[in-house]
Image: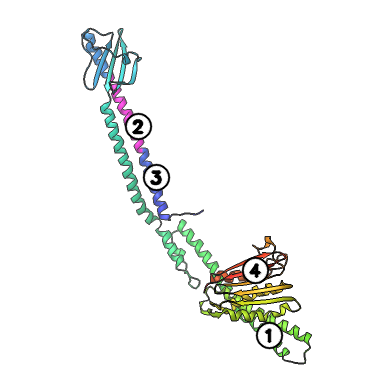
Amino acid sequence: MRFSRSLRSRVATAFAAVGGGVSLVIAVGLYFGAQDAGERLIDETLNAEMQDYHARRSRNPHSLPPATITLLGYVAPGGANDPVLPKTLALQPPGFHHVHLGGITYRLAIADQGGTRYYLLYNEVLFQDRQVRLTLFLAVFVALMVLISGGLAFWLAERVIEPVKELARRVRGIGPDTPHAGFSADFPPDEVGELARAFEQKLDRLAAFIERERAFTADVSHELRTPLAVIRGAAEVLLADESRTEKERRRLERIERAATYMSDLSTALLAMARERDEARREQVDLASLLQEILDKHQHLLRGKAVEVVLEIQAGPALNADPNLLSILVANLVRNSFTYTERGTVHVLLDATHLSVSDTGLGIPREALNRVFQRLYKGKNSLGAGIGLSLVRRICDRYGWKIELHSEEGKGTRAVLTFSN
């Protein structure tokens, strides 16, 4: 679930919505209540006037019905002096009705008594004007309530979320080497306190994990490098003995190369394990490093009909850890040399790209997106182990880009895009 607004704005919006909704319900209730009360009052007024006119008519049969701005009366059948009943009213049955007469809305009351039908109309213009004013008043009331509740909501929201903001400040100020000193005790035993305790438990586990990782890297740095240095030194001493046969020398060279590779790889992995490596960066001449790596891996082409073409169009200097850059380039070269039995390996270096192309086995289409996964082993074993996975991680570390273009049976092209 993703939230595009801050907690404060969501709380304030909820308060404002509730305030606006309540005020709207109250306004609607007041409107219909006032309308119903007004109609009841008009009907009671018409009943009272009708009874009064009946009484006057019974005392004086020639008494005329009311004829004022508010009230207007008719009788049927009427006398010679009585006003003429409009046809619209003559069609209405006894009871209460709303009618339009002469462009004016009336509330009509009709009653029969003694063979005579009485009509009494109440002019609703004033009542309708009051309803319009009431509607405007209620609309202003709702708008003001929304504004007031919104302002109060923002003020209250700031106070409500202050414990959450304080917790965020506490957690933000805690680093890998900063003890948190039990900050959850400063929060009350409510939801925020529960969240603080959960953070504290996670931070404890994270601190313990970091400590174990540091101990592991320190042990690896000392306990692994030392025997590898012993192996390399022993191999160099044995290679210095000219009495060794060619077969023995090849085996010793293989041991030395493996020890060197393991030493470089352990150094690279330890560098990747560090959070920052600015202190280990330096300007590396990529052209010289590339030439050195090609020479170092010539043994992989021994006995193969493979031609290596090196084309250097520029000599960029990259700001990086030399060991990591060496591991990256060596992986690309080693893959091409290993999986090319005949043909050409073309290495091209310019100011922004390093391209390694070969006419080797190629990579199946379905495996192209997976060869950078750690320990993935494809049909041709390309990508097995941590080689290409480490290449991708190094590129991500420096903001570089690595791409593979391949067709099974025709070859592979690896392109490294870097920034100077």
Tell us which disc is closer to us: 1 or 4. Answer: 4
Which quadrant of the structure image shows residue 303? Answer: bottom right
Which quadrant of the structure image shows residue 383? Answer: bottom right
Identify the residue position indicated by label 4 in the image: 413
The answer to whether 373 is drawn above or below residue 85 in the figure is below
Residue type pointed to by label 2: Phe
Q: Secondary structure at mark 3?
A: helix
Q: CA distance from mark 1 to mark 3?
A: 76 Å
Q: Secondary structure at mark 1?
A: helix
Identify the residue position indicated by label 3 in the image: 18
Tell us which disc is closer to us: 1 or 3. Answer: 1
Q: Residue at x 45, y 58 (%)?
A: 192
Q: How dense is the environment of label 3, judged by Cα within 10 Å: few (below 14), some, or many (20 and up)?
A: some
Magenta includes 42? yes
**Nearest the eye: 386 or 195:** 386
Residue type pointed to by label 1: Arg
Residue type pointed to by label 4: Arg
Do labels 1 and 3 touch, CB within 8 Å?
no
Q: How dense is the environment of label 2, judged by Cα within 10 Å: few (below 14), some, or many (20 and up)?
A: few
Q: Residue at x 43, y 61 (%)?
A: 187
Q: At which x and y percent is residue 42?
A: 29, 24
Q: At which x and y percent is residue 283?
A: 53, 80
Tell us which disc is closer to us: 1 or 2. Answer: 1
Residue type pointed to by label 3: Val
Please state the extent of the stretch shown in magenta in the rendering. 26-46
Q: At which x and y percent is residue 124?
A: 28, 25
Q: Which mark is residue 224?
A: none
Mark 4 or mark 3, earlier in chain: 3
Q: CA distance from mark 4 to mark 3?
A: 62 Å
Q: Which mark is residue 32?
A: 2
Specify the principal SS of the magenta part: helix
Identify the residue position indicated by label 1 in the image: 232
